[in-house]
Amino acid sequence: MPTTTAELAELIARVARGDRSAFKAVYAATSSKLFGIAVRILGRKEVAEEVLQEVYVKVWERAGEFDPARASPITWMATITRNRALDEVRRRAPVSIEDTPEALEIADTGEDALAQLARNEDGRRLLECIGKLEPQRREVVLLAYYQGMSREALGQRFGRPVATIKTWLHRSLAQLRQCLGE
Amino acid sequence: MSDVDDINGLAGEFVLGTLEAAERVAVAARRRREPALDAAILAWERRLAPLAETVPPVEPPAGLYERIEVALESTAARALGAPSADIIDLERRVRRWRWTAAAASLAAALALVVIGVREASRPEAVQSFVGVFNKDDVSPAFMLTVDLQSKVLTIRTVGAPQQPGKSYQLWIKTTPQTPPRSLGVIASASYTVGPELAVYRTDEVRGATFGVSEEPLGGSPTGQPTGPVLHAQLVPARP
């Protein structure tokens, strides 16, 4: 992304004042990232397009609520995107065979992606802590985060009862939190 | 397990995305009145944020930005005191309906002007709503007014040309799963629907999507919309 965090925060501040050209710049700087997140969770590009449209309308409407002290601009926007995508994917009936994405390549749980985490300090710490989870539990956490899989879907995938998945998730989360020192 | 663990586990699952739809809604509501839960959610968003940055970017389709701008205009209209037309939701439904209908019929081009009306959640919400069906970006083709209390709907032909051998047909769609149902062929310049609408509950009418399609004279031969696409836009109803 060519735009730096500080530049993006400044653009969002301008969006909050109703600056449409700043909004367009925010879109240019962030839309492929946010679309990537939405597509990964929703699995279908046309649905991800709808969600992305709603996300940017929200960004426009809520730019004034953005607080750079609480989150980076991209984290703020990614959170809006993930929440909308997760709400949408949960609301929809289970995806049928015909619904599976045509030309959409959904990457795996992303051990490759994890390597990228090492690029900054927060990422390095998170990577280290995720790396300490048992492999299967690590996979559960990553599939949930990246692909928006529900407990039920994870249960099917790992051949475990939903209650077991819930236990795994809660233990993994507690372990992560402890490892991150909070 | 202590309450703190509970809150952290729940917040973590909310952010990971593993909760079911109803749980997500419940947590979203709870966080508004429980600062501890809200703080726990924010903390998880921050902790896991580096993962989001690793997701490979995917270029959105050209034209999406323009669609967003159109949605912003509608939102601006709503902010000017619209009773509540939920335009974003509406536009989503427009497209969803198009897909469903396209999937349901083999007709290549689908054929609807769609409009949704929805009451504001405020109790004093206005009971009447207006929708405009635009045949192009500027000229209105039909005006729709709905009085929720009496469940009477009136659609007036404004700029839609009367075409020989063609009829305009009005449709209602109450849920994403149900196919559109005809509310009749718009036979006059001001066409009123009463009994056909009375079978629906008020909340169904309020949340419904309405559509107008161009059909062969006398109406759709298939019982489902078949004609060409027009664009729809909502305008605020003035109380």
Image: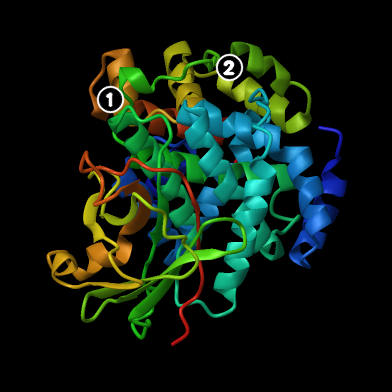
Seen at 47% across and 60% down, the residue is: B161
Disc marking residue B162: none
**Residue identifier under label 2:** A131
Question: Are tags 2 and 1 found on a single chain?
Answer: yes
Quadrant in which residue A151 is drawn: top left
User: In this rendering, does residue B87 appear at all?
Assistant: yes
- Label 2 and label 1: CA atoms lie apart by 21 Å
Q: Nearer the viewer, residue B223 or A31?
A: B223
- Horizontal relation, residue A7 to residue B144: left or right: right
Seen at 65% across and 32% down, the residue is: B60
Q: Chain of mark 1?
A: A
Residue A66's place in the image compared with B188, above or below, is: above
In the rendering, at what x and y percent does residue B184 appear? 22, 59
**Residue identifier under label 1:** A164
Mark 1 neighbour density, 10 Å: few (under 14) some (14–19) many (20 or more): few
Residue A106's place in the image compared with B24, above or below, is: above
User: In this rendering, does residue A166 appear at all?
Assistant: no
Q: Chain of mark 2?
A: A
Which residue is most to the front?
A: B164
In the rendering, at what x and y percent does residue A42 appear? 46, 31
In the rendering, at what x and y percent does residue B216 appear? 31, 45
